[in-house]
Amino acid sequence: MMSQVNGNGPLSIFQVAGRAMSAQLVRMNTTASNLANAGNSASTAEAAYKTMKPVFRTSFDAASGMSTVDVEKVVTAGEAPTQRYDPSNPMADKDGNVFDAAVDETRELVDMMETARGYQNNIEVMNTAKSLIIDTLKLGR
């Protein structure tokens, strides 16, 4: 669902790309957090680390005819923590169980690569727009 961008005037290509880069940065940070917590254990399923994912919201700017993206919120997603019997673990509950974070490291690495590509694509958009503006200004000389 696209919502209307509220602001003062139409969005520029730099604002569109910048907002997309900010959204990708949130995605990269959540992915890094997920990878950093892979393999962590807790004494309860509730305390075990849960994978985080950003929820993106597309916004349409009628004045410019362009859409951009924002992070609406960050949610927990993925599988439930894995229960493992390990009575020698100091974090084990009274039944000898520990709960491992269910982080799919392969999926997270793929997400990280996709995020880096998306971020880089937006840098290219900004560089191309900048070059076109400079070239246009040179025509006026």
Image (spheres, grey):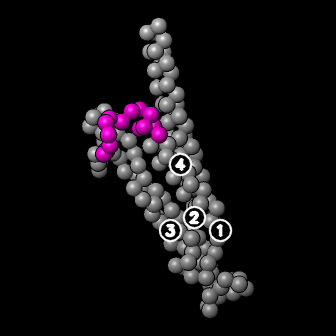
Amino acid carrying label 1: it is Gly
Upstream in sequence: badge 1 or badge 2: 1
Q: Position of residue 30 (x, y in %)?
A: 54, 57
Upstream in sequence: badge 2 or badge 4: 4
Q: Position of residue 44 (x, y in %)?
A: 57, 82
Return the residue at label 1: 39
Closer-to-camera residue (58/88)? 58
Upstream in sequence: badge 3 or badge 1: 1
Upstream in sequence: badge 1 or badge 4: 4
Return the residue at label 3: 79
Q: Position of residue 88 (x, y in %)?
A: 73, 85
| Left or right, 21 with reference to 65 | right
Return the residue at label 4: 25
Bin the neighbour count of mark 3 within 10 Å (Cα to Cα): few under 14, some 14-19, many 20 and up. few
Verify whether residue 13 appears in magenta.
yes
Image height of 63 relative to 40, above or below: above
Hey, which residue is sitting farthest top in the picture?
Answer: 141
Give the magenta part as a residue range.
5-18
Measure the C-alpha gap from mark 3 to mark 2.
8 Å
Verify whether residue 34 appears in magenta.
no
Upstream in sequence: badge 3 or badge 4: 4
* Disc number placed over residue 103 in the picture, else none: 2
Amino acid carrying label 4: it is Leu
Measure the C-alpha gap from mark 3 to mark 4.
24 Å
Identify the element where label 3 is drawn. Answer: loop
Hey, which residue is sitting farthest right in the picture?
Answer: 88
Bin the neighbour count of mark 2 within 10 Å (Cα to Cα): few under 14, some 14-19, many 20 and up. many
Amino acid carrying label 2: it is Val
